[in-house]
Amino acid sequence: MHEELDFLFAEAEEKMGKSVSHLEKEMIKVRAGKANPQMLDSVKVDYYGTPTKLSQVSNINTPDPRSILVQPWEKNLLGPIEKAIQAANLGFNPQNDGTQIRIAVPPLTEERRRDLMKQVKSEAENTKVSVRNIRREAIDAAKKLEKEGVPEDLVKVFENNIQELTNKHTAMIDKLVEIKEEDIMTI
């Protein structure tokens, strides 16, 4: 293919990959009923006047599928960590035992599972729209290059390759949704 078309293709591939990576990160945030330390990623603790990620001031692990254990590196952070978890509005009720904070992850109701699936599907659809927009932008750029002298047959090959790339990323998005749906709907 033509150098400029190769560049357009690589750029589109990178952007589509970033869109799918973003979706993966968003799906990790969706609570599926099983305890996961990443559920607390959004929690910021007041650490000597500075809002700091919980993971930077404590050890977070999951001793079993229904609980999260937060062990602060400094004992005086127990109170601020407990307040920060409650303020994050994640639906958790942290239990402070004087040395660590235990969080019981409540099982999901059927209605909550359906709501989470709507959220996942909506996020996936937004990602698909993003991927299709990247495809459209790449094809428009290729057509401009065609007007500037790039052979029409190379542009057609490029359009087919971009469509294949789009299909590949759309299939990846569908697979992520399928995996997350199984995760959410499994009791």
Image (tube, grey):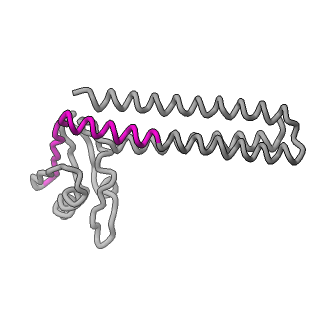
Residue 7 screen position, x and y as percent: 75, 43
Residue shown at 34%/56% (left/top)? 56
The foreground one among 172 and 154 is 154
Relative horizontal placement of residue 164, taking residue 103 as reference (left or right) = right
Q: On the rendered image, what quadrant is the C terminus found in?
A: top left
The foreground one among 64 and 167 is 167
The foreground one among 142 and 179 is 142
Residue 186 screen position, x and y as percent: 26, 26
Residue extending furthest toward the bottom: 49
In this view, 78 is above or below 101: below
Residue 129 screen position, x and y as percent: 53, 42
Residue extending furthest toward the right: 149
The answer to whether residue 64 is visible is: no
Question: Which segment did they paint magenta?
Answer: 99-125
Q: On the rendered image, what quadrant is the N terminus found in?
A: top right
The answer to whether residue 170 is visible is: yes
In this view, 94 is above or below 166: below
Residue 25 found in image quarter = top left
| Residue 177 counted in the magenta span | no
Residue 169 screen position, x and y as percent: 56, 33
Residue shown at 16%/51% (left/top)? 101
In this view, 128 is above or below 164: below
Residue 62 found in image quarter = top left
| Residue 114 counted in the magenta span | yes
Relative horizontal placement of residue 144, taking residue 37 as reference (left or right) = right
